Image (cartoon, rainbow, N blue to C red):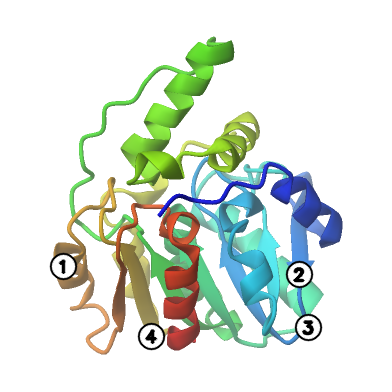
């Protein structure tokens, strides 16, 4: 089933968002909000920004108020004071307390590196997090798969587009038709505004070490064909000792960026968990 690309979706969603800013390092952190209802916090992955959720915002905003920040050092948010877990999640905590009113626990969903940050947010600021849902997150002690990537820096035109599409299929997506123009636009914008290297923030076990320091409930969603963190059953087995009552859902026919590749199936899974 090919992904239906809407080249104008990013600009349209950006125009519809309610934009807020909170302190971050020596600058500020950008938050975008869609919908009405009970707040739901969505954290993007590495080399990303709020656009990682572009195919989920409109469906999920029908029943929840979506609070989607650009994490410190990515997207439109400035660099944190320190490029470590505390430096990234403490501005998130300040933003939540400021914008949503005090120490009220919220549901926090994190994609990939965002899942690691959700766990550290819960560990450092437990009063702010009611539950965590991680999506294809590393940092659970399982090895990162070997991925062959094409060089992008310094390339232009058709060569750059071909390299970006190849890398999307190596890391993020499973089906070739999923690497469409919208996915390419999200990837381009994410690369342009990424200033933090995520690997040391994730690998090998930075998610589960945070889980061990808190008792926040956790559930998980995985793409059946996740590239960086393959074999959902083995990932579930690694996570299960930390949260024996965890619910673990697999999105069929999807890679790492499962909420983009199969948005309807992902949205249904997330709604059931929430």
Q: Which mark is residue 258?
A: none
Neighbourhood count class around disc 1 (C-alpha, 10 Å): few under 14, some 14–19, many 20 upward? few
Asked whether residue 124 appears in the rendered view, the answer is: no
Residue of label 3: 101
Observer-side mark, 1 or 4, equals 1
Q: Which mark is residue 233?
A: 1
Q: Is residue 87 above or below residue 99?
A: above
Please report whichever mark, 1 or 4, sits nearer to the chain's N-terminal start: 4
Residue 157, how many percent across, how many down? 58, 12
Residue of label 4: 215
Q: Quadrant of residue 233?
A: bottom left
Observer-side mark, 1 or 3, equals 1
State the separation of the CA atoms marked 1 and 3. Answer: 39 Å
Residue of label 2: 34
SS at mark 1 in the image: helix
Q: Residue furthest front?
A: 1
Observer-side mark, 4 or 2, equals 2
Is 90 on the left-hand or right-hand side of 78? left
Residue 153, how many percent across, how many down? 51, 15
State the separation of the CA atoms marked 2 and 3. Answer: 17 Å
Neighbourhood count class around disc 3 (C-alpha, 10 Å): few under 14, some 14–19, many 20 upward? few
Q: Residue at x 51, y 71 (%)?
A: 109
């Amino acid at each position: 089933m090919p992904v239906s690309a809407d080249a104008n979706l990013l600009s349209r969603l950006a125009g519809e968002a309610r934009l807020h800013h909170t302190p971050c390092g020596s600058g500020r952190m950008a938050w975008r909000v869609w919908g009405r209802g009970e707040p739901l916090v969505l954290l993007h992955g590495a080399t990303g920004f709020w656009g990682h959720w572009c195919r989920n915002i409109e469906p999920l905003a029908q029943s929840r108020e979506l609070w989607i920040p650009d994490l410190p050092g990515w997207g439109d948010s400035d660099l944190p004071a320190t490029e470590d877990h505390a430096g990234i999640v403490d501005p998130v905590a300040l933003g939540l307390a400021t914008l949503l009113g005090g120490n009220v626990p919220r549901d926090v969903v994190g994609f990939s590196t965002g899942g690691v940050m959700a766990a550290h947010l819960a560990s450092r600021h437990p009063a702010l997090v009611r539950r965590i849902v991680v999506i294809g997150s590393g940092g659970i002690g399982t090895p990162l798969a070997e991925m062959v990537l094409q060089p992008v820096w310094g390339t232009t035109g058709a060569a750059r587009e071909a390299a970006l599409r190849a890398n999307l299929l190596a890391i993020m997506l499973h089906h070739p038709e999923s690497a469409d123009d919208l996915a390419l636009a999200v990837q381009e914008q994410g690369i342009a505004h990424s200033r933090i290297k995520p690997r040391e923030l994730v690998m090998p076990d930075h998610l589960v070490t945070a889980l061990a320091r808190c008792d926040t409930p956790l559930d998980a969603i995985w793409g059946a064909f996740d590239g960086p963190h393959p074999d959902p059953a083995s990932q579930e087995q690694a996570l299960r000792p930390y949260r024996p009552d965890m619910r673990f859902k697999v999105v069929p026919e999807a890679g790492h960026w499962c909420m983009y590749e199969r948005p309807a199936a992902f949205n249904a899974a997330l709604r059931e968990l929430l």
